[in-house]
Image (cartoon, rainbow, N blue to C red):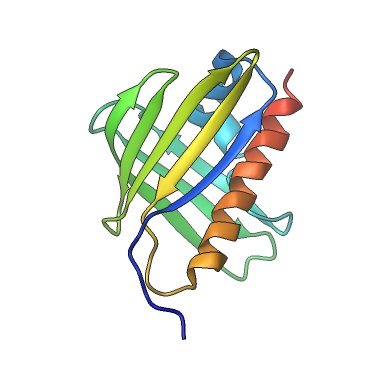
Amino acid sequence: MEKKTNKPITIETTVHAPMEIVWDCWSNPDHITNWAFASDDWHAPYANNDLKLNGKFKTTMAAKDGSMSFDFEGVYTSVKKHELIEYDIADGRHVATLFSKLGSDVKIVQTFDPESSNPREMQKEGWQAILDNFKKYVETKI
């Protein structure tokens, strides 16, 4: 039996795009609605983002067939432009996203506290799918 742990989960990707484009696509609600979902049968019909210390964000993620939706929201605890974004999700879990230049690319490493309802591997796969969707979206912008 798998032992339950609250150890943070880490995912990552490398985006083949300049930092300015990566940052804009990550933080601009007009872009967020185009990538903030894990599979093609979901979408993000709404996003609002106030990217600053103590600023709030909210993205609605919904099944395209209308069967379910939820709001992913929280408050920023640290913002360092082109470097780091940290926030606390409404349920109290913490997320840190690190942006690093790799030549003309950007490496993104995201670490998040897991929730207790779903298996760790399922959470990791879901968050990684969203990050992969982000990469795919950004790379169409260059």
Closer to us: 113 or 72: 113
- Is residue 34 visible to us here? no
Closer to us: 19 or 12: 12
- Is residue 13 visible to us here? yes
**Position in image of residue 87 (x %, y %):** 32, 41
Closer to us: 108 or 35: 108
Q: What number of labels is visible?
A: 0
Seen in the image, is 112 located left or right of residue 14? left
Q: Which residue is at a point 47% across and 60% down the rendered structure image?
A: 70
Question: In the image, is residue 111 above or below residue 79?
Answer: below
Q: Quadrant of residue 85?
A: top left
Extreme-bottom residue of the structure: 1
**Position in image of residue 84 (x %, y %):** 38, 27
Seen in the image, is 102 located left or right of residue 83? right
Question: In the image, is residue 125 above or below residue 10?
Answer: below
**Position in image of residue 107 (x %, y %):** 57, 28
Q: Which residue is at a point 65% across and 28% down the rendered structure image?
A: 15
Q: Quadrant of residue 92?
A: bottom left
Q: Which residue is at a point 59% across and 50% down the rendered structure image?
A: 128
Closer to us: 9 or 67: 9
Question: In the image, is residue 2 above or below residue 101?
Answer: below
Seen in the image, is 26 located left or right of residue 116? right
Seen in the image, is 46 located left or right of residue 95? right
Q: Quadrant of residue 64?
A: bottom right
Q: Quadrant of the C terminus?
A: top right
Q: Which residue is at a point 31% across and 55% down the rendered structure image?
A: 93
